[in-house]
């Protein structure tokens, strides 16, 4: 092991590594703050965020009766209605199959007077 002045490329490599670590840490932290703690119950779904836009500690509640649309996006259900959009990722729950069944059982149904079209 030799001691002495570091080679010129050594400092650049360390700086690049440090900047990479800072970038990845910031990206992970941003995703964590944007994440939503979800509570599902018989009345609706609640989402609590640490940061939402320029606000801190935001609580949003969407009643099942107000859900207008349920769609999927990147392994998540997106519940929309009453001016809200709440994203639920079943895989973060201990029993994801139960979460999927719970949401599917409560998603809006077409009115009885409008038949559902089927494509064959």
Image (tube, grey):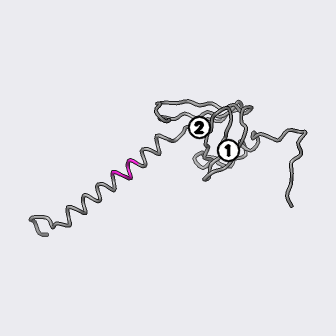
Quarter of the rendering occupied by the C terminus: bottom right
Instruction: Identify the residue at image location x=62%, y=48%.
Output: 76
In this rendering, the count of numbered labels is 2
Residue in view at x 69 percent, y 31 percent = 63
For residue 41, which quarter of the picture?
top right
Q: Which mark is residue 29?
A: none
Q: Does the magenta-highlighted stretch encompass residue 23?
A: yes
State whether the magenta stretch is mostly helix, strand or loop.
Answer: helix
- Name the quarter where the N terminus is drawn: bottom left
Query: Which residue appears at 42% of the width and 49% of the height?
Result: 27
Task: Name the spot of residue 33 as percent of width and height, x first.
Answer: 46, 40
Magenta-colored stretch includes residue 98: no
Which residue appears at 90% of the width and 39% of the height?
Answer: 113
Q: Quadrant of residue 48?
A: top right
| C-alpha span from label 1 to label 2 | 11 Å
- Residue 86 shown left or right of residue 32 in the figure: right
Question: Residue 42: x, y in percent?
Answer: 71, 32
Does residue 73 appear left or right of residue 21 in this picture?
A: right
The stretch in magenta equals 22-26
The dot on residue 38 is 2
Q: Position of residue 71 (x, y in %)?
A: 69, 47
Q: Label 2, secondary structure: give it.
A: strand
Q: Quadrant of residue 38?
A: top right
Mark 1 surroundings within 10 Å by alpha-carbon count, few (fewer than 14), some (14 through 19), many (20 or more): some
Question: Is 80 in front, or is 25?
Answer: 80
- For label 1, the SS is helix
Label 2 packing within 10 angstroms: few (<14), some (14-19), many (20+): many
Question: Where is 110 relative to 55, above or below?
Answer: below
* Residue denoted by label 1: 99
Going from N to C along the chain, the mark reached first, 1 or 2, is: 2
């Amino acid at each position: 092991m030799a001691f002495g002045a570091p080679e010129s490329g050594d400092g650049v490599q360390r700086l690049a590594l440090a900047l990479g670590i800072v970038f990845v840490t910031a990206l992970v932290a941003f995703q964590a703050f944007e994440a939503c703690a979800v509570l599902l119950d018989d009345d609706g779904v609640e989402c609590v965020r640490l940061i939402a836009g320029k606000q801190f500690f935001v609580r949003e509640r969407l009643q099942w009766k107000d859900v207008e649309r349920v769609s999927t996006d990147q392994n998540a259900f997106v519940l929309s209605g009453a001016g809200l959009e709440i994203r639920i990722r079943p895989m973060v729950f201990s029993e994801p199959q139960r979460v999927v069944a719970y949401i599917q059982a409560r998603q809006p149904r077409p009115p009885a007077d409008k038949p559902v079209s089927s494509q064959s």
